[in-house]
Image (tube, coloured by chain):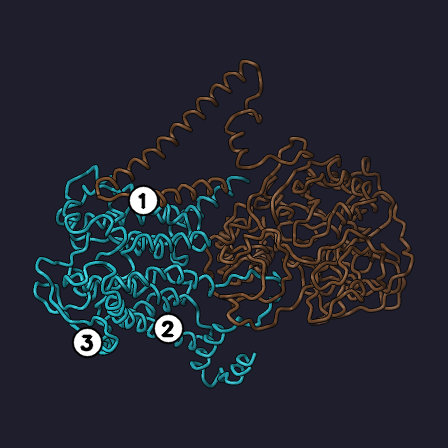
Amino acid sequence: MQSFRRIASSFFTLFLLIFSTSQLSAQSAETSGDVFVIAILVIVGALILVSAVLMLSENFVQLEASKTGVDVNQKSNLTSSVSQLWQSSGPEYAGGEHVHQLKKGHDILLNGEAEPVVHASKTTRYALKPTDYRGMSPIPKVVVAEGDEVEAGDVIFFDKKNPAVKYVSPVSGEVVAVTRGEKRSIAEIVILGDKEVKYKQFDPPSISEASRDDIVNFLCESGGWSLINERPFDIVPAIESVPKNIFISTFDSAPLAPDMGLVIQGKESAFQKGVDTLARLTEGDVHLGVDARGETAPSEAFTQAVNCKKHWFSGKHPSGNVGIQIHHVAPINVGDKVWTLTVQQVITLGELMFKGKYDAERIIAITGSEVVAPSYHRTYLGASIDELLANNLKEGKNRIIVGDVLSGAIAGEGSFLSQNSDQVTVIQEGDYYEMFGWLLPLSPRPTISKTFPNFLFPNLKFDADTNTHGEKRAFVVSGQYEQVLPMKVYPQHLMKAIMVGDFEQMEGLGIYELSEEDIALCEFTCTSKMPLQSILRDGLDMMREDA
Amino acid sequence: MGLLETFKKIEPDKKKQPLLHTGYDAIFTFLFTPKTVSKGGTHIKDGMDLKRTMVHVVLAMQLCYLFGTYNLGHQHFAAMGQYVGFLEGFHLKLIHGLIKLLPLFVVANVVGLGIEFWYAAKRGHAVEEGYLVTGALIPLIMPPDLPIWILVLSIIFAVILVKEAFGGTGMNIWNVALMARLFVFFAYPTSISGDDVWISGFDSIRDGMAANYGWAHSAFNWLFDWMGLATFSGGQVIDGYTGATPMALAYQGGWEKVTEVYSVSQMWWGTIPGSIGETSKPFIIIGAAFLLATGIASWRIMLSMFVGAAVMAMILNGWDATPFMSVPWYYQFYMGSFFFAMAFMATDPVTAASTNRGKIAYGFLIGFIGMIIRVLNPAYPEGWMLAIIFINTFAPLLDRLVLNSHMSKRLARG
């Protein structure tokens, strides 16, 4: 589509050029018209000639191929090689396997990328938050009380609607607080961690021999089940749920995202065990989205993984989003359930099945322009963000984000990591006035618009801040969303369908295929500053309650 | 930031003086990008906003403004046979153009923005930027001698009934600027059609009709006299001058009749009578290229509109029943306001189709139908205004077709 666009626009430009020059050069009416007609005839003639030659040679190649017995449907025919001129083939390390080359998207380059060094843990407080788990009743049954000693893997709370699924402690230590939020809902259960984590020893069933029910029951008891995310609604799956497929994206393309190759170092076998376990749980396959963007091959833990199907993806963000990968491999249809996990969740699952320990160790990338020394930190699920960032922040008014700048959550004072987070980003708050900022911006800022000179400096990195650079308006967009969303959906129309609560259209336009992170870039580019992610979540919540 | 603090001090109370506060807010946000920060969702935002989008469309029109203003003066003197060379009498042509254009521009913006401010205050939201473009477009598509009261009526009609009634910028179905013109066209047809209206400064275009100068001309005469320059000396329409536009001529006698009066390069460069902004093709194309390069206007709409018009013109060439039909299809683009409509009118993101495939159909249909109206309709020899408004009406339907086919494909996939 991109190449078509390029051809079409260049032809249009050519057309206008000829139109103008024929006029400039010609003196009288007669000749100018002639020049114009001749120019058009020449172009059309050349096009016909080229396509005739292509078709003819294509036929010859096919004839020759059928004589020699080569499979012509593979990569040997001419049209595919012509199309390869437009889309360069995948990287060498993909070994000729099919690479999903996503043409749409945008990489936002920011300052403050994490140095590839993993620092040891310095955090002492951890929290498990019922609010991390969508759809859970606001007041779950908390089975521990303040002052209790717990081991990593001990049950902390469970949902009264779904009592089989247990939510367990990521570390060992003392429960120091059960914080309540609005209407007596449970906000978080805070645990003061031991220096040396003591693990509750489980007795895991054999991955290859135990029945699926045994594995499910074990995972529910040991907290492994709570790691699983079920699309379309991003919930913890019900215990009777059997997914169509399980997807794991092994790379993150978001701004300043952590390098999964670093995260998985030393945990390759646990990852494989996790994949093996998941393969028992689905009626379809476990699919890995593998990074084909870089110069060098991704970690062998991903490329050599077995018991799963691997799909290479290249292209700008959001190529690493699992939602985008699902769309290109096996899209979610009405009624489908698909599970997704992050790499670190798979590792925890693998450790659980391998060693019988709930090892929720997390490597967190501390990133952003306002971090003094951006790097990786080894800690545990739910660690205190204040402790993670201690003595590592620059002066000034900062915004701390759990996750990336596109779809992370604002972390207030005393907040903790979420159950699926692997990144913390700190950027400046942008609460300043800017004179004629809309017309003549003083500082460079990320944008996809060609009205800024950014496209001349593709490698420029930005100190982005949280200023909205404009006010909210009604939808006046033309094509920005489509430019950054490598999916066959109509984001603008879907959003409008959600806003008017049209269930049939929401379903028809593919709301089930989307999650906040997938349309985060659309929200970033939106001229009218529409809060697309929260609109989408409203729509998904509506569908979930309706279901 | 002394200015910022001064501005903060004089902020009127929003509850007590809503209209004043709206005006203040509009001017303040024009001067300063507000300090609003993102609340969850995407934490960083693209530097592009609606103000910037709209101002780039206005920028793209500036060459049309420059040329249109000067050409107003040029046509005025050409009718009297004075300063026949394009650059002769430069100051007189420029000043005459400004005297004619400025009232249109000022009134269009004061009236339109006034209504916008009033509605914004009533609804308690900020003034939206859509009128920046509408207010810049309206003077370019009106005849130069249009009585101001008609202009005011047309703008009141367009802004209230076509835009605010639907909810303001981003909600309207029809192109606001074109609806203002449409209003004039149906309510006061004599002031926007015929041969008389495109030459400014005469009551009508008849042999011996004297130029009509007002106080502004006298004031400048006094100034020019003092500076020792040529002055507005008055004059009469010369024998045989009709003021007919190429479109009118083509309707009477086809391309031959057109080229008897205007050369091809005159039509191309735009030194012919017509609406203020539409005549100069190269400057419009530069504006269009600017909009395409910055990605503000949709290339799909422009390209398919061009193709649609060309296809219809070729069909008419084949039919060949009237002199106008036999005008070679490529010469159709030299006459009338095709390029202006393509660059600035059809591409309005609010009223155009919003799906990519819908945009292609939308552009094609405009080109196709506009050419039918231009050539086959005896009453009015230009079709883009009517075609665009007609297809604006169907744009949601085109989108609906695209979405329905998309939805049925998605269902079939399962």
Residue type (three-letter) at the residue carrying disc 2: Leu
Name the residue carrying label 3.
B214
Q: Residue under circle 1?
A: B308
- Tell me which amino acid carries mark 1: Gly
Q: Measured along the vertical axis of the image, is residue A157 above or below residue B311?
A: below
Chain ID of residue with mark 1: B
Seen from this angle, which residue lies furthest front?
Answer: B228
On screen, residue A394 above or below B14: above
Q: Which SS class for mark 1?
A: helix
Pinpoint residue A291: horizontal percent, then vertical percent.
68, 42
Q: Which type of secondary structure does the marked residue at label 2 adopt? A: helix
The disc label shown at residue B113, or none: 2
Q: Position of residue B340 (x, y in %)?
A: 32, 55
Nearer to us: label 2 or label 3: 3
Distance from the alpha carbon under mark 2 to that under mark 1: 35 Å
Query: Badge 1: how crowded within 10 Å, few (<14), some, or many (20+)?
Result: many
For the residue marked with disc 3, what is the amino acid? Gly
Spot the brown chain and give its letter: A
The chain coloured cyan is B
Establish whether labels 2 and 1 are both on one chain. Answer: yes
Nearer to the camera, A305 or A14: A14
Q: How much space separates mark 2 and mark 3, taking CA atoms?
A: 28 Å
